[in-house]
Image (tube, rainbow, N blue to C red):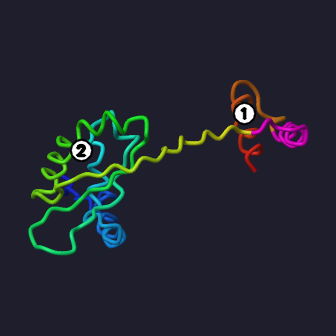
């Protein structure tokens, strides 16, 4: 007896929320949410983490005139990126499917480094709370649970 094949109705999260971000991005001049998603491919791995599209400035007058893309860039890579702007513009227009961007302007501002959260060392009170709870556990499981408990209690 063969089982019927069930088709999954699950959808990727990007497909579900992609359209909801479009109005918010349009306010900033970014026509589509995919631009942010495509950004690492457009600028390449060298500039992906230290640049971000800030806005697209469309001309007020004249149909057919291309827009200006404003990029937030870390000052450390602004000069090398400035030599590669023609390639970035061509790749961007290729992703968009038409000549939307004619010029690119760089705005230099340092990118904030991601903060590494270090757990505080557990105090004597935390040790006192954990010891009786782990009394019935033996071996490597006890050590793992003690480590987990210290990490959780040191954050709260």
- Image spot of residue 75 (x, y percent): 43, 40
Q: Is residue 150 above or below residue 101?
A: above
Q: CA distance from mark 1 to mark 2?
A: 43 Å
Which label was assigned to residue 147? 1
Tell me: 57 left or right of 100.
right
Q: Quadrant of residue 60?
A: bottom left
Tell me: 7 left or right of 80.
left
Using a 10 Å C-alpha cutoff, classify the residue at mark 1 as few (fewer than 14 neighbours), some (14 to 19) or many (20 or more).
few
Which label was assigned to residue 103? none
Q: Is residue 2 above or below residue 44?
A: below
Nearer to the camera, 120 or 7:
120
Residue drawn at (20%, 62%), measured in percent from left and top?
67
Q: Is residue 1 visible?
A: no
Query: Which stretch is magenta?
Result: 120-133
Q: Which residue is mark 2?
A: 42
- Image spot of residue 43 (x, y percent): 27, 41
Nearer to the camera, 60 or 127:
60
Q: Residue furthest top?
A: 139
Nearer to the camera, 152 or 97:
97
- Image spot of residue 85 (x, y percent): 23, 42
1 or 2: tag closer to the N-terminus: 2
- Is 22 one of the magenta-colored residues? no
Q: Secondary structure at mark 2?
A: helix
Q: Secondary structure at mark 1?
A: helix
Residue drawn at (74%, 40%), measured in percent from left and top?
149
- Of labels 1 and 2, the one closer to you: 2
Using a 10 Å C-alpha cutoff, classify the residue at mark 2 as few (fewer than 14 neighbours), some (14 to 19) or many (20 or more).
many
Residue drawn at (46%, 47%), measured in percent from left and top?
109
Q: Is residue 97 visible?
A: yes
């Amino acid at each position: 007896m063969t089982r019927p094949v069930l088709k999954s109705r699950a959808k990727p999260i990007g497909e579900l929320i992609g359209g909801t971000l479009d109005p918010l991005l349009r306010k900033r001049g970014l026509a589509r949410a995919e631009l942010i998603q495509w950004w690492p491919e457009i600028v390449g791995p060298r500039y992906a983490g230290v640049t971000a599209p800030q806005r697209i400035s469309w001309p007020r007058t004249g149909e057919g005139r291309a827009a200006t893309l404003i990029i937030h860039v870390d000052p450390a890579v602004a000069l090398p990126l400035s030599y590669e702007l023609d390639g970035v513009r061509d790749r961007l227009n290729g992703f968009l499917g038409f000549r939307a961007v004619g010029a690119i302007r760089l705005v230099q501002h340092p990118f904030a480094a991601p903060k590494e959260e270090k757990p505080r060392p557990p105090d004597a009170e935390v040790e006192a709370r954990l010891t009786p709870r782990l009394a019935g556990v033996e071996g490597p499981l006890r050590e793992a649970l003690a480590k987990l408990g210290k990490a959780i209690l040191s954050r709260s």
